[in-house]
Image (cartoon, helix red, strand yellow):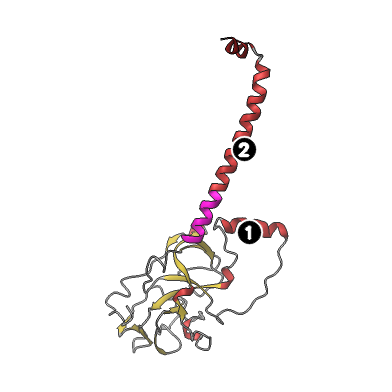
Amino acid sequence: MTDNSLAADASPDHQQRPRGKRGALLFLRDLLIIFVVALLVSFLIKTFLVRSFYIPSGSMENTLQIQDRILVNELVPDVVSLNRGDVVVFQDPGGWLPQTVEAPQPPVTAAVEWVLSIFGLVAPDSDDHLIKRVIGLPGDHVSCCNPLGQMTVNGVPLNEPYVKLPAGTEKVSGDPFDIVVPEGSLWVMGDNRYNSKDSRYNGDTPGGGFVPIDNVVGRAFVITWPSSNWAWLDNYPSVFQGIPASEEE
């Protein structure tokens, strides 16, 4: 009882100061814990689930516009299988992109970009990646063009609503090709068919124009910015419906 009375008789100023200081320290501690947990969760999401990329060229118009920002599902292809029609981001197989020298950044800019990259809000390595649509899976026989200007996969002609062609043009490729996709690789093409340096035009690279599945970072599934372009990215399953499985599938 004596101790309780002494505590009750103490002046308000004498009690509030240490409690207020301790409360501020607890608040800062909780804030730091929340920040660290958020940072860890964002890092794990970026590493294993979702990454953000920006579009640097017009090779996927009109599906994607220059400077669009997209989210990529990194569970593809390790957990979720690839499908024909998927829009995929992949590392340069070698020779697809010109070599560039990275310009030095001011320290503050570099630090901010590093923090944002941890949260998956920017992708500093976007310039080392490409984005195209999967047309051929391992074992597929892909050729172009038939008398109607269509591409065929395993003998089935494709009606491709996502393709951008020059006015008055019917052929979905300006150059003919006839290939079989090797095991463990993909045949990819840009939707802007007459302005895309895709599998058709990388035959002289180490991979012969094919993209190793191991190079695939993931499948793009949504445009996040600008808000006026927000959209889910379709892989158009109806376009590829009825294609017989290749020997590799």
Mark 2 falls on what kind of element?
A: helix
Residue type, numbered disc 1:
Glu
Can the viewer see residue 151 in this picture?
no
Mark 1 falls on what kind of element?
A: helix
Quadrant, the C terminus: bottom left
Q: Which residue corresponds to mark 2?
A: 28
Q: Mark 1 to mark 2: distance in Å?
A: 25 Å
Q: Quadrant of residue 153?
A: bottom left
Q: Nearer the viewer, mark 1 or mark 2?
A: 2
Which mark is drawn over residue 57?
none
Q: Position of residue 151 (x, y in %)?
A: 37, 83
Q: Which residues are magenta?
A: 38-49
Compared with 108, 25 (above or below) is: above
Q: What residue appears at the point 30 percent right and 71 percent down from the top-left corner?
A: 238
Q: Which residue corresponds to mark 1?
A: 113
Q: Position of residue 95 (x, y in %)?
A: 56, 82
The crowding category of the residue bearing disc 1, from other C-alpha atoms within 10 Å (few below 14, some 14 to 19, many at least 20), is some
Is residue 161 a member of the stretch shown in magenta? no
Compared with 168, 58 (above or below) is: above
If you read the primary sequence from the N terminus, does the residue marked by circle 1 or circle 2 appear first?
A: 2
Q: What residue appears at the point 57 percent right and 38 percent down from the top-left corner?
A: 30
Between 13 and 101, the residue placed more toward the observer is 13
Q: Position of residue 59 (x, y in %)?
A: 51, 75
Quadrant, the N terminus: top right
Dots 1 and 2: beta carbons under 8 Å? no
Q: Position of residue 224 (x, y in %)?
A: 49, 59
Between 147 and 91, the residue placed more toward the observer is 91
In the image, 167: left or right of 151?
Answer: right
